[in-house]
Image (tube, helix red, strand yellow):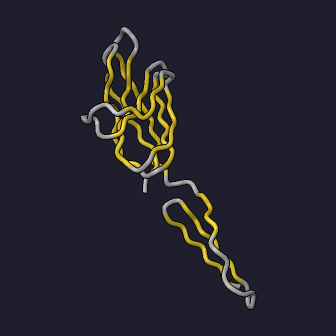
Amino acid sequence: MRSLIAVASGLAALSLSSCGGGGASMPAPIRTRPNITSSVAGGPSRAHAWTCAFAFSAVPGPVTAWVSPGSYYLQLHSGDCGAPPSLVVDSNSGSLSTVVPLGRYHVMVGNPTDEAGAYEIHVDYPLS
């Protein structure tokens, strides 16, 4: 009996054929989790202001971000920090989650309070 397993870009294919059993079967795709990278960033935050907190490149897959304090807002935009606004997803609950295509992204942190403060964000994103 012969077997072949191949993994590339988050897909695995498995093909089995038996001795004297005729032609080989077509590979069936099996979804696997892409490589995920976690990053932490932080900094000062002015009252009622938005800050570009973190920029990254991602392959297709899930992106999750959360901020401390949890009362702060988050936005995920496509492009770099200096790019025109291009909102992908936003949240006023301190965390967000979405699935993104291949590309460059940045996370904005918003301080909705009347006081300046500091924040820390955690971002999980797919990496090739």
Q: Farthest top residue?
A: 114
**Is 25 placed above or below 95 here?**
below
**Is 4 placed above or below 62 here?**
below
Position of 90 with respect to 46 (left or right) is right
Give 45 or 95, whichever is nearer the viewer: 95
Q: Farthest left residue?
A: 82
What percent of the width, then of the height, locates residue 26? 64, 74
Residue plotted at (55% across, 62% down): 11
Residue plotted at (26% across, 36% down): 83
Position of 99 with respect to 13 (left or right) is left
What percent of the width, then of the height, locates residue 10? 53, 59
Which quadrant would residue 24 be assigned to in this image?
bottom right
**What number of labels is visible?**
0
Q: Quadrant of the N terminus?
A: bottom right
Give 94 or 31, whichever is nearer the viewer: 31
Residue plotted at (47% across, 35% down): 65
What percent of the width, then of the height, locates residue 51? 31, 26
Residue plotted at (35% across, 10% down): 115
Q: Quadrant of the C terminus?
A: bottom left
Q: Farthest bottom residue?
A: 20
What percent of the width, then of the height, locates residue 52? 31, 30
Position of 60 with respect to 48 (left or right) is right
**Is 109 placed above or below 114 here?**
below
Give 110 or 20, whichever is nearer the viewer: 20
**Is 83 placed above or below 114 here?**
below
